[in-house]
Each structure stands twice: as structure tokens, then as C-alpha cells.
Image: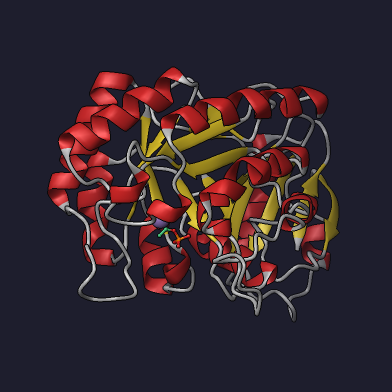
Amino acid sequence: MIVVMKTGSTKQDVEHVVQLVREMGLKEHIIVGEERTVVAVIGNDRFKDRTVLESAPGVDKVVPILAPYKIASREVKKERTTVSLGKTDASIGGKRIGVIAGPCSVESKPQLLEIAHAVKESGAKGLRGGAFKPRTNPYSFQGLAEQGLELLALAREETGLAVVTEVMSIDQVALVHRYADVLQVGARNMQNFNLLNAVGEQDKPVLLKRGMSATLEEFLLAAEYIMAKGNTQIMLCERGIRTYEDYVRNTLALAAVPELHRVSHLPVVVDPSQGTGKSQLVDSMCRAAIAAGADGLIVEVHHDPEHALTDGAQSITPQQFDQMMKSISRIAAAVDREM
Ligand code: PEP
Ligand code: MN
């Protein structure tokens, strides 16, 4: 349930509500809105008596939250959440669209720096690149690990781009946190609940990818795990789901964008690279994602896709990325967004 405070309720009123919530054995999550404060009650409140909250001073009303996720729900917070990208002035979730671009994997210093400078030049705000790669085949390239993270930090120093990189397990969280601006939780880990809890305890934003067979409700419950631990800086990333269709690697479910916006206040980022698996489809899907209301994009770019160590088939070149940025800026303007 959520406790909606009256406009003009005092800090003491809110503190009293918090105390009552805790006495019920539940937890609170306070959201200070522009007009009024809302106290979201976290935990299983199905059999709790809410009349005591209803009659507390400063309380306007107590409303049940219908969705199983609470802090991630639009019922709790009407205003959209914006997530800042590291120390840059860019954020994702506002009027301005944020684009994160870079190679699937960090392969070498010249590779990463060449791509980082190129995407920066074309208007990207974040630099992606995996140092720890979740590979289907154990004999495939697994990433450069800490050396890859060091290269990402160097690229940030040279370009000012915010670093977005994947953390695959709890024991990597501290290390990745030291180098990254945004912690990426991959599709294969969307329901790694221990990892979700661990990134929930960090003070850096999380890019949470949708599991390839997860429903939107499961996706939002994964976000809820992170938020329940105190980290509310989350970007939801639609990266395509596994279907019977085989002309693409994954089926990019773009209807998820408006639907996630309807039920949640969290920003939505679309990954058309994993979402299609084919470089020639990336540009169109970027435009479609922006038209559907996406707050950001994460795109794989490689200067030599044919020789990329991972995901070359879905990587666009820096020149194609530059074209794509120009074409999405026209779509952005048409849907009242900015680049
Ligand atoms: C990636 O971004 O390279 C990646 C592995 O993504 P996903 O977790 O969506 O498959
Ligand atoms: Mn990839």
C-alpha cells in the first residue's frame, strides 16, 4: 500500500507514519514529490490493518498497490525517474535521449580508443564494452577482465564518456564498481537474485537487461529487488526475447517500451544490437525505438565488425553509427524529444 500525505503535512507527520509502518513489521520507502510526499509500504501488507495509518495526522489516504512490484511501480511514483550517467551532465529518462555506444567486448587499447572517440564525436553520452562476457561457449573469448576495465577507464579519461559495463557475479561487484559509471546486469543474470541484491547495495546506476524469456512482470520484479536494497537508479533495457522466429537472433519487443512506461516510472533503454543480431536492422530499430518513446539506446559499434571477437554480425561501423544518430534526431524531434 501507499500512504499519501496531505499537501502541507509536516516532517513529523511523515516520521510518525514511518514509525507506524515499522511497528507493523514492514519497511518504508519515502518519495518526496513536487506536490506531496508518499510513503510506500514495502513488504507483505495483505493482512495488515490500514485504518491506523488512515487516521494518522497529515495522512490524506491509504491506497493499495495492485502491482506485485512496489517501488518500481507508477502507482507509487507518477513522476518519471531520471538516471544520471556518471559524472557527465547527461541523464536518461528526461526529455533528452541518451545514447550509449561501443563495442560488444573490450578487445584492445587501440580498438577501444578508436571506437570511443568515434562514438563521442557522433554524440554518444555513454561508452559500452564488456570486460566480463557471458558466453554460451566456454571456449569463446571471455573478455579481458580487469585489464578491460582499465582500458574503459582510460577511454573515459580521454573522451569524457560514462562507462557502462557488465558485472556477472557478486564477487565482481566491487571490482567493476571501481571502474564503471553504470553497472550492467545482463539478460542471463536478470533473475540472479543474489547479484540483484548486491548491485542494489551500490551507489551507482544499474542498466538492467530483460531476461530473454522473462515477462515484463518478472522484469519489473527484478528491478524491485535492486530498489528494495536502496538503489533506485535503474534503467530498464529491452534487448529482445527468444521466440520461434529465426530471421533475427532475438525478437525485439518494442511494445514493451510504452507498456513499461505505463506501469513504471523507470526509464527504458532499447538494445537493437542484441535485439536483432543483424547490423543491417539496427538503424531501423533505433528509429522505431525512439518513435515508441524509448529514453535511450545502447548500440554495439565496431570499427572492424568482420574481425570483432564478439557479436560482429550485429555491430555497426562508426560511419553507420553517425548516420543513425542523424536519423534518430529527426525522429526525436517528431516525438517532442531532444538529442
Ligand atoms: C551485451 O550487451 O553484449 C550482452 C551480452 O547483452 P545481453 O545480456 O542483453 O545478452
Ligand atoms: Mn554483445
Pick the residue in front: 29 or 94: 94
Quadrant of the picture in which ligand 1 is shown: bottom left
Report the side of 269 relative to 190 (left or right).
right
Image coloring type: secondary structure
Q: Is residue 229 above or below residue 318?
A: below
Residue that appears at 19% across and 46% down: 148
Pick the residue in front: 153 or 287: 287
Judged from this view, the residue extending furthest toward the front is 306
Q: Is residue 214 above or below residue 11?
A: below
Residue that appears at 46% across and 59% down: 229
Decide if residue 231 is in sight here: yes
Q: Is residue 12 above or below residue 244?
A: above
**x then y, percent, for residue 33:** 72, 35
Q: Is residue 296 above or below residue 279?
A: above
Q: Looking at the figure, which quarter contains the N terminus?
A: bottom right
Pick the residue in front: 308 or 113: 308
Pick the residue in front: 10 or 211: 211
Decide if residue 270 is in sight here: no
**x then y, percent, for residue 187:** 48, 65
Q: Looking at the figure, which quarter contains the C terminus?
A: top right
Residue that appears at 53% across and 69% down: 211
**x then y, percent, for residue 116:** 33, 29
Report the side of 276 relative to 179 (left or right).
right
**x then y, percent, for residue 238:** 60, 56
Report the side of 74 relative to 87 (left or right).
right
Judged from this view, the residue extending furthest toward the left is 147
All told, the count of numbered labels is: 0
